[in-house]
Image (cartoon, grey):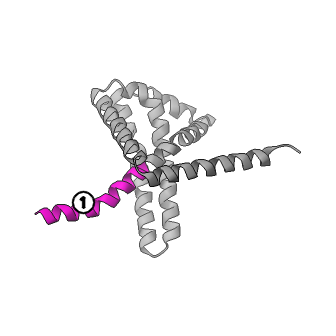
């Protein structure tokens, strides 16, 4: 029995690390995806939909958060099928695109429905649990010297890109 637990730990450890990294990637992209969702939502044809979503009662607002999942799930299955045919690049592109689109939709719907969702006791508890889990993941990753090195390297790369972009956008 004990060897089974060790085997499970060996199998689950990389999945846990991958899950934490995906969660942190989504967190980093959240603001950009909210902005993308807001830009899309500002299109005149979508204003009516935004106002209807904003006015949903709490329980329907919670159901509205499932909409992106149901919308994107078939696309994710399609991506897995594409990868199973050996076209890994295309499959991963479709999968990542679906993930980004789904996250943008969830971010937009969450932003619109957050006041209504905050009236649901169970939702407030789930959100608190999520923030606690996220803080735990940050503490855990921040304790790894390799993660700190990667984070510093990514920060330097980001700064270089911003400097390059500023240089490109200067008028001549």
Question: What secondary structure is the stretch in magenta mostly built from?
Answer: helix
Indicate the position of residue 57 as horizontal and vertical percent values: 37, 26
The answer to whether residue 169 is left or right of residue 89 is: right
Indicate the position of residue 161 as horizontal and vertical percent values: 68, 50
Q: Is residue 90 above or below residue 136?
A: below
The answer to whether residue 60 is left or right of residue 165 is: left
Indicate the position of residue 144 as horizontal and vertical percent values: 41, 51
Taking the view exactly as shown, the residue that stands out farthest to the left is 1
In depth, the one of 40 and 46 nearer the eye is 40
Indicate the position of residue 10 as horizontal and vertical percent values: 27, 63
Question: For residue 120, what is the image quadrant?
Answer: top left
Tag 1 residue: 9
Q: Within the magenta stretch, is there residue 34?
A: no
The answer to whether residue 51 is left or right of residue 118 is: right
Taking the view exactly as shown, the residue that stands out farthest to the bottom is 86
Mark 1 Cα within 10 Å, few/some/many (few <14, many 20+)?
few
Q: Is residue 53 visible?
A: no
Question: Residue sitting at 28 percent across and 26 percent down?
Answer: 121
The answer to whether residue 153 is left or right of residue 162 is: left
Q: Secondary structure at mark 1?
A: helix
Question: Residue sitting at 45 percent across and 47 percent down?
Answer: 24
Q: Within the magenta stretch, is there residue 10?
A: yes
Question: For residue 6, what is the image quadrant?
Answer: bottom left
Question: Residue sitting at 52 percent across and 69 percent down?
Answer: 89
Q: Is residue 124 above or below residue 161?
A: above
- For the C terminus, the quadrant is top right
Residues in magenta, as a range: 1-23
């Amino acid at each position: 029995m004990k060897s089974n637990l060790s085997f499970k730990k060996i199998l689950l450890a990389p999945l846990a690390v991958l899950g934490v990294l995906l969660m942190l990637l989504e967190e980093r992209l959240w603001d950009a995806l909210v902005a993308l969702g807001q830009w899309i939502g500002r299109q005149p044809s979508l204003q009516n939909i935004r106002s209807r979503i904003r006015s949903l009662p709490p329980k329907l607002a919670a159901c509205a958060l499932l909409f992106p999942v149901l919308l994107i799930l078939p696309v994710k299955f399609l991506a897995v099928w594409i990868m199973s045919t050996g076209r890994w690049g295309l499959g991963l592109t479709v999968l990542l695109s679906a993930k980004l689109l789904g996250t943008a939709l969830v971010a937009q719907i969450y932003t619109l429905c957050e006041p209504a969702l905050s009236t649901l006791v169970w939702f407030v508890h789930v959100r608190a649990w999520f923030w606690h889990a996220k803080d735990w993941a940050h503490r855990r990753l921040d304790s790894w010297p390799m993660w700190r090195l990667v984070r510093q390297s990514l920060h330097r790369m980001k700064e270089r890109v911003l400097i390059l972009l500023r240089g490109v956008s200067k008028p001549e």
